[in-house]
């Protein structure tokens, strides 16, 4: 729900605001988009918007829209702010002006697209499929400064609600009656509390869409919180915790959604907290220091009245009145009672130099003492050759003029010393050159010896290669010869063994045949039994012959393996 436009403060309120903050006033430009749709036979018009479209007047990055310009102006006007009226040359009041900066627009400021978007990014060409358009309008609003602007706005809000509840209206009347004439407070505390309030608005904005109208609503709710009488009663027993901090915590918690509270309940980090630093910068751009100070004044009046002026007289010397530092170049603004403390540390205050007495800014004393003070110590250009005088910078020329003869004597002495040193160095150089020549000759001799040794090593390596080659050839020839002889011996042994085996086999066959013939002749059992012993003896001799043949064959195979030359010979 949007609030009605704020009632312009009275002349007395303007006067008090200027007293509280001399010359302080903030201005800002507010943008508004007017949307239209094209229909055949009807052309472009706000009335052609579809039932599914939002209203004609819209704000960037927001889902909210307004049917009339008055509704949009009311929603875009924060507490205490007023619309600026600019007149053209003819005296006509210019309310909203077309401003197509940052937009791709035609000559009349219209941007075209297929559909509306919250970012309002379109083309400068219409027609075809581009059946919607919008135009960016800009108007300036200003904040006159001082808490009275907020008090007047809050009074309008409460009077608007008086038709619903007479109690709230009476509470507002009491609020305005108890507001002191002097609205001055401690500006250091106001600046600190103003930063708290700005951070609170930024933290609360993380839980809703971020747009101009949302910021206006957040400021209105903050003003309502600061103006509630029950806050003082509720926080009276909080203890040492600052009641302003309690109010801020309650204000931020009231804007948190269910998801955020569940994340905190399960001890999880809020994903929106990472964007808080960026949001603070965005809120800072739309929450000027003059406005923050006005909200801080209300907070101080409610929770820390000791930090504000309680004098009810209109004309008095207020110790909390805002003053500017009188020193040239300093823009510090503080309360009158804090001016002396600031004077002790003001970097732009001019203080006399301890040497020359010239008044120099406090932050420039070091540079002045090193480079600009005429009484600073100067270094004589003849100090390197023995001049021990340390004159002031302003007396340096006089010192050079008065000490010409002494400087010449020092110069002559230095020249003589340099001549002696040059001679000593020349003799030393000659000695070093002779030593260097000797070392060079010795080095050349060493190089020649190294070259001869290298040649000898090359010759020995060549001879070693030849010897190794010859030895390899001799070993190969010897191994071939031994293999040939072994092969011949093996063949001879094999032949002899074959002959022996054949003879044994032949004799065995003969003996076996004779035995068989004898057995056939002597068929009686008695005779067979008598010759059985002789058959057994013949079988044993045959078995021993076969074993002898096997041993000979195994020896032949072992001799073949021994006769083979080993690898590498």
Image: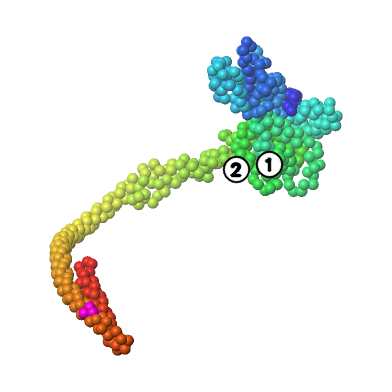
Give the number of callouts. 2
* Residue at 24%, 53% in the rendered image: 422
From the top left corner, tell me how far across and down residue 103 is, in percent.
Answer: 56, 23
| Prevalent SS, magenta region | helix
- Up-down: is 282 above or below 395? above
Q: Secondary structure at mark 1?
A: helix
**On the picture, is 295 further left or further right than 562?**
right
The answer to whether mark 2 and mark 1 are in CB contact below 8 A is: no
Q: Which residue is mark 1?
A: 260
- Quarter of the image for residue 91 reads top right
- Quarter of the image for residue 251 reads top right
Q: Is residue 134 visible?
A: yes
Return the residue nearer the eye: 99 or 329: 99
Write down the region rendered in magenta: 509-513
* Residue at 21%, 79% in the rendered image: 510
* Residue at 15%, 64% in the rendered image: 469
| Residue 345 numbered tag | 2
The answer to which of marks 2 and 1 sits earlier in the sequence is 1
User: Which label lies toward us, 2 or 1?
Assistant: 1
| Residue 282 numbered tag | none
- Quarter of the image for residue 126 reads top right
From the top left corner, tell me how far across and down residue 278 is, in percent.
Answer: 60, 37
């Amino acid at each position: 729900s949007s609030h009605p436009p704020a009632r312009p403060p009275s002349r007395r309120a303007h006067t008090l605001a200027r007293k509280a903050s001399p010359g302080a006033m903030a201005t800002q430009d507010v943008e508004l988009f007017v949307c239209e749709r094209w229909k055949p036979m009807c052309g472009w018009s706000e009335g052609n918007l579809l039932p599914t479209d939002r209203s004609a007047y819209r704000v960037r990055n927001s889902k909210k829209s307004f049917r009339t310009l008055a509704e949009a102006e009311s929603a875009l006007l924060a507490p205490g702010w007023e619309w600026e009226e600019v007149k053209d040359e003819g005296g006509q009041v210019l309310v909203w002006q077309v401003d197509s900066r940052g937009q791709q627009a035609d000559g009349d400021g219209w941007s075209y697209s297929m559909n509306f978007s919250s970012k309002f990014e379109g083309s400068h060409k219409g027609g075809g499929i581009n059946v919607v358009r919008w135009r960016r309008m800009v108007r300036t609003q200003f904040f006159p400064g001082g808490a009275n602007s907020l008090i007047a706005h809050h009074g309008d809000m409460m009077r608007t609600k008086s038709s619903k509840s007479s109690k709230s209206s009476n509470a507002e009347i009491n609020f305005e009656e108890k507001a002191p004439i002097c609205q001055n407070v401690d500006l250091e505390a106001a600046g600190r509390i103003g930063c708290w309030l700005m951070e609170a608005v930024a933290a609360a904005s993380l839980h809703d869409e971020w747009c101009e109208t949302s910021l206006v609503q957040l400021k209105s709710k903050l003003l309502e919180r600061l103006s509630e009488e029950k806050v003082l009663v509720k926080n009276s027993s909080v203890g040492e915790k600052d009641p302003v901090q309690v109010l801020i915590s309650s204000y931020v918690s009231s804007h948190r959604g269910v998801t955020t509270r569940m994340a905190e309940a399960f001890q999880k980090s809020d994903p929106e907290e990472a964007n808080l630093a960026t949001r603070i910068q965005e809120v800072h751009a739309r929450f000027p220091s003059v406005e923050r100070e006005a909200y801080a004044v209300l907070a101080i009046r409610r929770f820390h009245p000791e930090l504000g002026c309680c004098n009810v007289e209109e004309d008095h010397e207020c110790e909390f009145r805002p003053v500017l530092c009188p020193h040239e170049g300093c823009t510090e603004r503080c309360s009158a009672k804090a001016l002396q403390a600031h004077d002790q540390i003001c970097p732009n205050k001019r203080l006399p130099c301890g040497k020359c007495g010239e008044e120099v800014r406090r932050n420039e004393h070091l540079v002045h003492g090193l480079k600009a003070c005429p009484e600073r110590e100067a270094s004589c250009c003849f100090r390197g050759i023995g001049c021990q005088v340390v004159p002031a910078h302003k007396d340096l020329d006089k010192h050079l003029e008065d000490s010409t003869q002494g400087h010449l004597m020092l110069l002559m002495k230095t020249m003589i010393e340099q001549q002696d040193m040059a001679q000593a160095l020349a003799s030393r150089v000659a000695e070093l050159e002779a030593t260097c020549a000797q070392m060079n000759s010795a080095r050349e001799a060493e190089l020649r010896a190294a070259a001869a040794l290298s040649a000898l090593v090359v010759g020995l390596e060549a001879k070693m290669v030849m010897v190794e080659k010859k030895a390899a050839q001799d070993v190969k020839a010897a191994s071939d010869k031994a293999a040939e002889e072994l092969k011949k011996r093996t063949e001879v042994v094999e032949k002899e063994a074959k002959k022996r085996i054949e003879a044994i086999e032949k004799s065995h066959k003969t003996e076996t045949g004779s035995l068989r013939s004898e057995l056939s002749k002597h068929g009686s059992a008695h005779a067979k039994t008598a010759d059985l012993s002789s058959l057994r003896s013949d079988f044993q001799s045959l078995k021993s012959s076969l074993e002898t043949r096997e041993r000979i064959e195994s020896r032949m195979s072992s001799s073949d393996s021994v006769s083979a030359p080993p690898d590498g010979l």
